[in-house]
């Protein structure tokens, strides 16, 4: 898959409908990942579902989405976008992932991202993504049933992320996406209760970048397929750090909150400036450089 630039919109941020995705396309992003979509509509959790903390954002949205049939309308509106559209899906078992993968392909996306990593959606996240055998089986079956690239998105909330990345690679995944949010919680001292309605959520943004970098570094040491780095990218230098750890591209989610929808353009400019100042001509000279 060829991208105009190495920045990709991460799943779940401004990608629930075509209107906001078109705005992101116009702002210079290299590719888009859709909100994670399931077989049927899901309301998500009641508010509060998101809170800004000192160094990041804590959310437990509960995977709200209209279901795959309705989401087709949004994908159709992106037909003229001229950048790759990656359809993110979540399911509770192999059959659901296979059906969702086939539908996404039929609706015209360029690749499928398997969300095996939501930290707070009971039955749809870590229960599938923390088991290397299940990750291997889901990836293999979706791969068998489809013809477009399959990306596997992993969670940092596991003991051994490398084992899970290898299980996906062995099942012929085309790329690994690391990482989803970090399981976390915030308590309101006055009311003596967790702030999120779901109590536990996923932490994203600046605070999780070192965790993402560590995961990409460990995975890159053990697998050969491309890695897409995600977690806390807000500047060009954040992206360069992910490239050095072994990522070929980066996804940006919370960075939009900090720098607006032009974050993609800004990060690309900053990458170019950094490369010029350090006498690099091609990204390939930087990717995985810490491993040499
Ligand atoms: C509000 C919100 C909703 C999210 N929804 C999804 C989702 O539906 N599917 C998914 O794979 N990741 C989801 N994520 C995780 C992001 O795609 C990304 O992995 C994570 O936020 C780390 O990147 P960031 O620090 O750039 O935000 C969500 C994150 C946030 C903040």
Image (cartoon, rainbow, N blue to C red):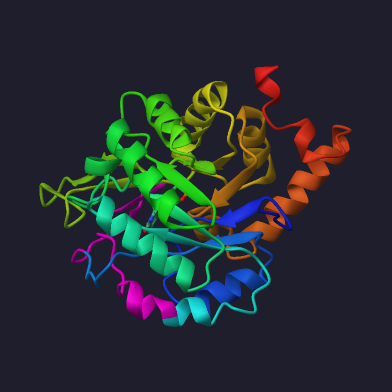
Query: What is the quadrant of residue 48 in the picture?
Result: bottom left
200 shown above or below 277: below
185 to the left or right of 275? left
Q: Position of residue 14 (x, y in %)?
A: 47, 68
134 to the left or right of 169? left
Q: Nearer the viewer, residue 167 or 20?
A: 167
Q: Nearer the viewer, residue 54 or 256?
A: 256
Question: Where, quadrant-wise, is the C terminus in this rendering?
Answer: top right
15 to the left or right of 36? right
Main secondary structure found in the magenta portion: loop
Image point (45%, 62%), residue name: 13
Query: What is the quadrant of residue 104 in the picture?
Result: bottom left
Query: What is the quadrant of residue 183 in the picture?
Result: top left
Image point (40%, 69%), residue name: 103
Image point (31%, 70%), residue name: 65
Q: Position of residue 43 (x, y in %)?
A: 22, 71
Q: Is residue 180 visible?
A: no
Magenta stretch, residue numbers:
45-72
Q: Nearer the viewer, residue 84 or 61?
A: 84
Image point (59%, 58%), residue name: 259
Q: Is residue 58 magenta?
A: yes
59 to the left or right of 254? left
Q: Is residue 222 visible?
A: yes
């Amino acid at each position: 898959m060829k991208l105009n630039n190495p920045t990709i919109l991460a799943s779940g941020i401004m990608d629930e409908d075509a209107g906001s995705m078109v705005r992101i396309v116009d702002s210079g992003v290299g590719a888009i990942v859709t909100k994670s979509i399931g077989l049927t509509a899901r309301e998500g959790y009641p508010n509060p579902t998101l809170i800004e903390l000192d160094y990041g954002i804590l959310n437990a949205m509960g995977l709200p989405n209209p279901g795959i049939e309705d989401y087709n309308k949004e994908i159709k509106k992106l037909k003229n976008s001229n950048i790759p559209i990656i359809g993110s899906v979540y399911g509770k078992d192999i059959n659901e992932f296979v059906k969702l993968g086939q539908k996404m392909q039929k609706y015209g996306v360029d690749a499928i991202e398997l969300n095996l990593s939501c930290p707070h959606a009971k039955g749809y996240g870590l229960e599938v993504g923390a088991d290397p055998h299940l990750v291997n089986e889901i990836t293999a079956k979706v791969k068998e049933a489809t013809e477009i690239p399959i990306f596997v998105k992993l969670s940092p909330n596991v003991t051994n992320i490398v084992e899970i990345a290898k299980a996906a690679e062995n099942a012929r995944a085309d790329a690994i996406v690391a990482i989803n949010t970090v399981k976390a919680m915030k308590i309101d001292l006055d009311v003596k209760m967790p702030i999120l309605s779901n109590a536990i959520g996923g932490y994203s943004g600046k605070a999780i970048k070192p965790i993402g970098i560590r995961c990409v570094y460990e995975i890159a040491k053990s697998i050969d397929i491309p890695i897409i780095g995600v977690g806390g990218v807000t500047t060009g230098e954040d992206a360069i750090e992910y490239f050095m750890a072994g990522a070929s591209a980066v996804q940006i989610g919370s960075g939009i909150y900090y720098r607006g929808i032009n974050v993609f353009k800004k990060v690309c400019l900053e990458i170019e400036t950094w490369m010029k100042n350090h006498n690099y001509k091609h990204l390939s000279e930087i990717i995985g450089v810490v491993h040499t």
